[in-house]
Amino acid sequence: MNREEISNKLKSFLSKFFGKKNVESLGDDDDFFSLGFVNSLFAMQLITFMETEFDVTIDVAELNMDNFNTLNKIINIIENKTK
Amino acid sequence: MSDKNKKIKCVVWDLDNTLWDGVLIEDGEVTLKDNILNIIEQLDHRGILQSISSKNNYEDAMTKLEEFGIKEYFLYPQISWSSKSQAVKEIISCLNIGANTIAFIDDQNFERDEVKNSIPEVSCFSADEIGDILDNELFIPDFITKDSMRRREMYIADYHRKKVEETYQGPQEDFLASLNMNISIRNARDEDLDRVVELTERTNQLNTTGYTYSYEELKLMQDSDIHKLLIIGLDDKYGTYGKIGIILIDTSNEQWVLELFIMSCRVMSRGIGTILLNYIMDMAQTADKELYAKFIPTNKNKMMQLTYNLAGFKVFEKRDDYILMKNDLTRIQKIPEYVTLVSELHEYEEDGSRRIYG
């Protein structure tokens, strides 16, 4: 799966939370925490989505705002784990 | 408290020859066992939830329960031909409570063994033991609070919420907004302390340390200048959830340490925990104090760890019996527009509008 494919899947997931319009205009390095209030339910669903969609394992301890807040950061995590 | 003597939160009843005498599908006519009505009412009054696991025809069994006038006591009744352990698992997941807080009552050895084998944490009782359960320690909550008496009602409101949530299509935020949530935060008062003790003892999942306190200890902290003991309430358009959370902050040594943060599992997935943490972060910043939090990982409180991580708490140092986390307060999320937060703690309100999203 290339970066663009991963990015598109992520965007459609994020759209469910932040609305399609907001996500469409989101740059790869934009902080999506600024789009709306991010809670642990969102985080839990994001982890579950990443684990099932890309077959990686994410440890709760790894997850904090600074390494999950942009599309690029998430894509990097997925790529590193699937190597 | 060890897992062995966890207080029971939910009783799961078998029907045939357990709740009533006779086998519905064969006899058609069955009669409630002696004193069963009183036992059901007493358990309900103590705030212990009740459900059903029975191999029967769903419609017939429900009709019969209605005839006896006891249908409304049972949450998520599992009446089908699948295994009892499956039924108990379903109830556990619907109510979102630990398996070690379930009592399963069935007249058949086979069924009790099947459940025990699949979910060893569940306490199983035979139908002969029903007469003794009201006097059994496990079924006697330490406190019976206003909230515990209304627990079933609250779970029923929750059931309706879930139904709406399942059928809802659209961004999460819109759904949360449709709930009209009101969060209240204030200093604990004397009449809250029983509920605080109850929450520390009953809550395993959304609990940062698992510390429990006696009434006397809490009273001391409530009266002390160096502790903040805060109580959280929540209501929404379906009704009130009662008091659903506790925050305990130690403010000695010129810094704030979150000793304890507990949320009732009934409010899970409403985003309340994150909102409250951000509110505390905002308070600490206003008071110009460093903010730390104690955390003790258990096999049940992963969700709370996630909530802390997400709010920007990072491991500061590992102590012998807990992890100390620190929040550098650089990323404070404002309170989302979809909730109203009413705080009594005015000394930390610089400017109310500053903290609202949008």
Image: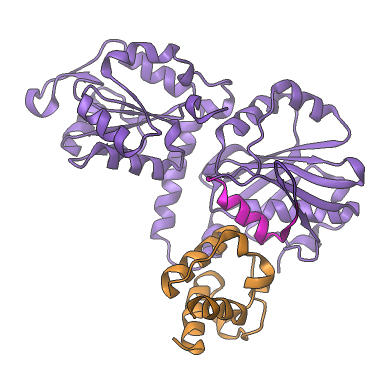
Chain colours: A orange, B purple
Residue A66's place in the image compared with B251, above or below, is below
The reply to whether residue B47 is in sight is: no
Task: Report the side of B211 relative to B74 (left or right).
Answer: right
Give B150 or B80, whichever is nearer the viewer: B80
Give B356 or B1, whichever is nearer the viewer: B1
Q: Is residue B313 magenta?
A: yes
Q: Quadrant of residue B72?
A: top left
Q: Quadrant of residue B259?
A: top right
Q: Which residues are magenta?
A: B299-317
Which residue corresponds to the image point at 77% horizontal and 61% vertical from the top-left? Answer: B355
Residue B238 position, x and y percent, is 51, 45
Give B148 or B93, whichever is nearer the viewer: B93
Give A54 or A8, whichever is nearer the viewer: A54
Which residue corresponds to the image point at 42% horizontal and 73% vertical from the top-left? Answer: A53
Residue B106 position, x and y percent, is 26, 25
Task: Report the side of B184 relative to B54 (left or right).
Answer: right
The residue positioned farthest toward the front in the image shown: B320
Residue B249 position, x and y percent, is 79, 41
Which residue corresponds to the image point at 68% horizontal and 73% vertical from the top-left? Answer: A34
Residue B235 position, x and y percent, is 59, 43
Which residue corresponds to the image point at 40% horizontal and 44% vertical from the top-left? Answer: B94
Residue B35's place in the image compared with A4, above or below, is above
Q: Quadrant of residue B31?
A: top left
Q: Is residue B87 magenta?
A: no
Quadrant location of the C terminus of chain B?
Answer: bottom right
Task: Report the side of B73 relative to B331 (left or right).
Answer: left
Quadrant location of the N terminus of chain B?
Answer: top right
Q: How many marks?
A: 0
Task: Report the side of B159 relative to B236 (left or right).
Answer: left
The reply to whether residue A78 is in sight is: yes
